[in-house]
Image (cartoon, helix red, strand yellow):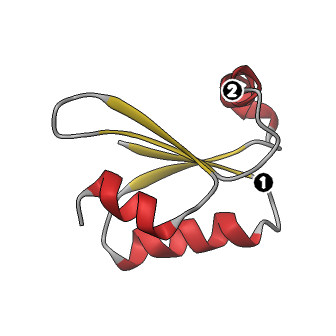
C-alpha cells in the first residue's frame, strides 16, 4: 500500500495525490497535522526531514522504498508505470 504523508495547503502534496489518482493507484493519505496520526508524525520525524510529501511503498521484490518530496519521474520509476 502506498502511503502519502501530507500537510495542509501543500502544493506538492496535492500534485502527488493527483498523480496517484490519475494513474488509478490506491494510497492512504496521512495528514501530519491530524491528532490521530501520531505514529505517522513519529515516522516523519524519524526521517529527519522538514518537507512534504513523503511517499512510501513496496516494490515488486517486497523491498520498501521512501520518496522524500514529490518528484514525478522518480515516483514513476518506483511505481514502474
Q: Are there few (<14), some (14-19), or many (20+) residues within 10 Å of tag 2? A: few
- Secondary structure beneath dot 1 equals loop
Tell me if label 2 and label 1 are in contact, CB under 8 Å: no
Q: Position of residue 3 (x, y in %)?
A: 49, 44
Q: Position of residue 39 (x, y in %)?
A: 67, 22
Q: Which residue is mark 2?
A: 47
Q: Position of residue 80 (x, y in %)?
A: 23, 58
Which image quarter: residue 41? Answer: top right
Q: Name the residue nearer the viewer: 45 or 39.
A: 45
**Total marks in image:** 2
Q: Is residue 81 above or below residue 5?
A: below
Q: Name the residue nearer the viewer: 51 or 1.
A: 51
Question: Looking at the image, is mark 2 or mark 1 earlier in the sequence?
Answer: 1
Q: Is residue 59 above or below residue 62?
A: below
**Residue depicted at 42% across the width and 72% down the height:** 21
**Mark seen at residue 7:** 1
Lateral position of residue 74 relative to residue 50, left or right? left
Lateral position of residue 59 relative to residue 56, left or right? left
Q: Is residue 66 above or below residue 9?
A: above
- Secondary structure beneath dot 2 equals helix
Amino acid at each position: 500500500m502506498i502511503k502519502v504523508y501530507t500537510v495542509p495547503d501543500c502544493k506538492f502534496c496535492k500534485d502527488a495525490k493527483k498523480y496517484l489518482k490519475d494513474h488509478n493507484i490506491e494510497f492512504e493519505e496521512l495528514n501530519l497535522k491530524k491528532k490521530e496520526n501520531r505514529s505517522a508524525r513519529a515516522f516523519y520525524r524519524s526521517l529527519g526531514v522538514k518537507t512534504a510529501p513523503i511517499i512510501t511503498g513496496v516494490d515488486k521484490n517486497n523491498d520498501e522504498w521512501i520518496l522524500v518530496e514529490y518528484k514525478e519521474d522518480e515516483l514513476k520509476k518506483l511505481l514502474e508505470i
